[in-house]
Amino acid sequence: MVRMLRRAFGDDIRVTLLLIIIIAIAYPVVYVVSPGWGVVLGHGITWVIALIGFNLLFNYAGLLSFGHALFLGIGAYTVGFMYKYLGITNVELHLLGSILSSAVIAFIIGFVVVKYTRIFFAILMLAIAQIFWSLYYKFYWITGGTDGIKVPRFSILGISLENLDFTSYHHIYFYLVTGIALVLVYIMWRIVNSPFGLALKAIRDNETRARFIGINVYKMRLYAFIISAIYTSITGALAANHHRLVTPDIAYWTTSGKVVFAALLGGAKVFIGPVLGSLIYHIIESFAMRFIYWQLIMGFFIIIIIIVMPGGFAQLIKTSIERGSRLIRRGE
Amino acid sequence: MEILKLIDVKKYFGGVRALENITTTLEEGELVMVIGPNGAGKTTLVNVISGYIFPDGGRIIYLGEEITRHPPLKRIEKGIVRSFQLVNIFDGLTVYENLMTALFSRWKNYSKMYKLVDQYVEVSNEAENILKLFGLIDVADKNIKSISYGDRKLLDVAISFAMNPKLVMLDEPTSGVATKDKYEIMEKILEIIRKTKVTSIIIEHDMDIVFRYGGRVIVMHQGRIIADGEAEEVRRNEEVKKVLLGGVYA
Amino acid sequence: MIGVEEILIRAYNIFFGASVLFLISVGLNIIYGVMKIVNLAHPAFFTLGCYAVAGFGMGIIINIFGSSSITPILIVPPLFAALIVVIASLLIFPLFLFMSGRGDEVQLLLTYGLLLILEDLFRLIWGSEPLRSSQPYELAGSIYIGEYIVPVYNIYVIVSALTVALLLWFFLFKTKQGILIRAASMDIEMTSALGADVRRVLLITVLFAAFLAGLGGGLYIPSGSVMLGMSVELLVLAFVVVVIGGLGSFLGSLIGSFIVSLLRTITLIIFPELELALIYIVAIIILTLKPEGLGGGRKW
């Protein structure tokens, strides 16, 4: 007799994958209506991966990091350096490269950082991210400084995309990213629902007791940290190819803020939250881009969300569905 | 067979004597209740045996091996498990998940990422058995926050038992529970201890409970053991009477 | 060979840096120490103080006092800055009330949001260019030590910081209110049981911290400039001061400020790009050896 863990709407993998697939189907239509919005959807899916990675640490391991832009930067600059110094444009190699570089760096940083929790962890991550940002900025002869590194269109499976029109090129990018996102989201879901995920949640809830039933808290947190870093840097690598320009901005503290904000917006407490968050965030950002004090708005809404709707949009949707179904049942 | 031996264990916190001259042995399968007024050192004793803190002097021998300075993880692996006075479980998980966490840890599977929790049939079955044993099967899928305090305390104990301990130490397992439920919970715990034949140290604050169930009782006062024997005998001890009845005792 | 003068100059700089850091970090420490609230936006108060003076304050002050009367030009700007920041903190106070007693996560996120808002507000009100306000600095003039020019203004800052430290020490350790606040920092529940109104304590603490931050900003700005992104740079520094010195420790603020300033000066000579990295490495080493920090405080 096996007990099946009942999954609520927010934690059901099918709903999450469905959401991504719906976006993928809507995309070509949206693109025809407005290519700009098609690009926005591209951003949205690209960042799903980083947000899922961030939330592994935030919701499941209980570690809030204000420095996740660090790994975005590592992914992006890996691509930048691979092109600038090795002439590599193959997206497969870019991804492999960022996975490797982020895993190594996350291991080194995590080794020290994961011993600390809560306040110190949050600010330590901010500080380390700032350190890396300042390095990208200052060592301009290596990184291109604020001018950054221009990256040409990526090649896929050895095939160059240089000669395509923008629309076809972007379609290829979009479906590449969507495919990667679907796979990575599924993998993350499996991780989160594995004994490892359970151990993480236990550590998050009660570190002492977890230790006292024999769980190696430090090791578990380190694994989570590395996985989170890898996911985030994959987005960095993809985003670098999407924007075709790698600058220190991607590693700046406000970019970390964007990650935190999007996670909260979607609802960090459930699995689908970050996915929802990434999409909603990029849609809102597109509208608000005309209003250049976006940072102000983000900060303001972070505060509003924490006070008024800590479960984010996912919670909102869930409550609406529950209320709706109750109304329907009453009507019968 | 002797399972635990404490030799002249002492612990000080600054100038405060928390434990002194603690010398005693425990036989396998024995059940000992430890009582004493607040500050007697009962919890410190459990802390020292479980490795939460190290003693300032003396030795702790477990199954013939000296474990005085072994870290908690090592002692857990050897089968020394404890619960805490304040309910110390995983608040964000369901009852079932709480137990599965402990079981995965014992099965040394907790770091595995490739299979889903649902797919571990054996572990799941064991969880169900333990839940049934503790009378918690009906609330298995409920979140911790929505079950009764008594159930939470039982879960706390269940988690300790899920570790398949050779020596289990329960720190006031009925504290905070409504008086009418205290006996129920203690009976359940004693029944399980009898069934599993695990060596147990139970810290209790409630005199009625301790003397109602008899068995071996250790009385502590100001860091020392002042009595150690059969419940009835201990109860009649003059010094014990003075300590337990006069003085700060709830 | 390093001459005596060069050492003096370096020492002078170190003390100056330490003074500024102290003024920022002591407020952070107080709010955490007393109310267990971590306020990531605290350095933004310092920055606000800088902007208040450089943005409009100095202009007003010079209009009133004329541009050559040295005493008011030295004393008024920091007080003006402190006033502005205190007013700002009053406006934000409801947020502190909400945060009081809630978990770390809530506080971190809320104050992070506040930080984002303030930094963008600075951009909205004062633009993206750095601002300066160097009249007091210039008026105070400079003296020669050997072949080095030493600004006199910095002495004023150091002396002010020392005065503040002394007054603070006196207040915390010798007055009834201060002792109450220190008691509160050890056990806020106990203190409320003793009759002190927790909300009032919170208000005093917040205003106090704001005052110190604003004062620091007003003192600092004539010697440098204020720009966007400064709050985060300061946060990262103030934080390491608190880590090294020990969270919640007044003495720690002094020790930490000095050490961080010392480290900064050293690394800026040897390896400027890695300044921040080195400071954090030292902080982690110290934390590993003494988790409560050098001044004694709470563990991380």
Image (cartoon, rainbow, N blue to C red):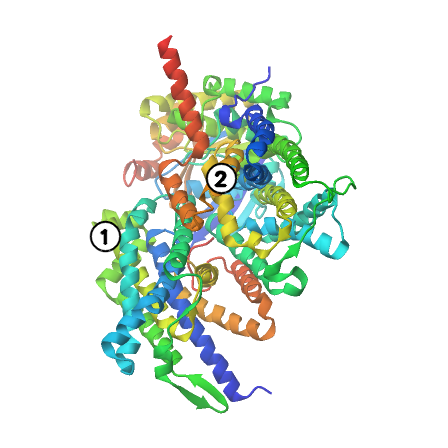
Q: Position of residue A248 (x, y in %)?
A: 58, 56
Tag 2 and tag 1 share a subunit? no
Quadrant in which residue A150 is drawn: bottom right
Q: Position of residue B43 (x, y in %)?
A: 43, 41
Q: Is residue B29 above or below residue C23?
A: above
Q: Chain of mark 2?
A: A
Category of crowding for the residue at label 2, using alpha-carbon neighbours closer than 10 angstroms: few (below 14), some (14–19), many (at least 20): many
Q: Nearer the viewer, residue A193 or A256?
A: A256
Quadrant of the rendering where the C terminus of chain A is positioned: top left
Q: Position of residue A203 (x, y in %)?
A: 52, 38
Q: Amino acid at mark 1?
A: Arg
At horizontal 47% and vertical 35% (from top left) the residue drawn is: A266
Q: Can residue C44 be seen from the camera position used here?
A: yes
The label number, if any, that marks residue C29 in the structure image:
none
Q: Amino acid at mark 2?
A: Tyr
Q: Nearer the viewer, residue A291 or A273?
A: A291
Q: Nearer the viewer, residue A198 or C297?
A: A198
User: How far apart are the two marked residues, 2 and 1, measured between alpha carbons?
Assistant: 39 Å
**Disc 2 versus disc 1: nearer the observer:** 2
Taking the image as shown, residue A325 lies to the left or right of residue A149, namely: left
Q: Can residue B105 be seen from the camera position used here?
A: no
Q: Secondary structure at mark 1?
A: helix
The residue indicated by pointer 1 is C200
At horizontal 60% and vertical 71% (from top left) the residue drawn is: C271
Q: Nearer the viewer, residue C38 or A32?
A: A32
The label number, if any, that marks residue A281 in the structure image:
2
Taking the image as shown, residue B70 lies to the left or right of residue C100, namely: right
Quadrant of the rendering where the N terminus of chain A is positioned: top right
Taking the image as shown, residue C165 lies to the left or right of residue A54, namely: left
Q: Is residue C170 above or below residue B188?
A: below
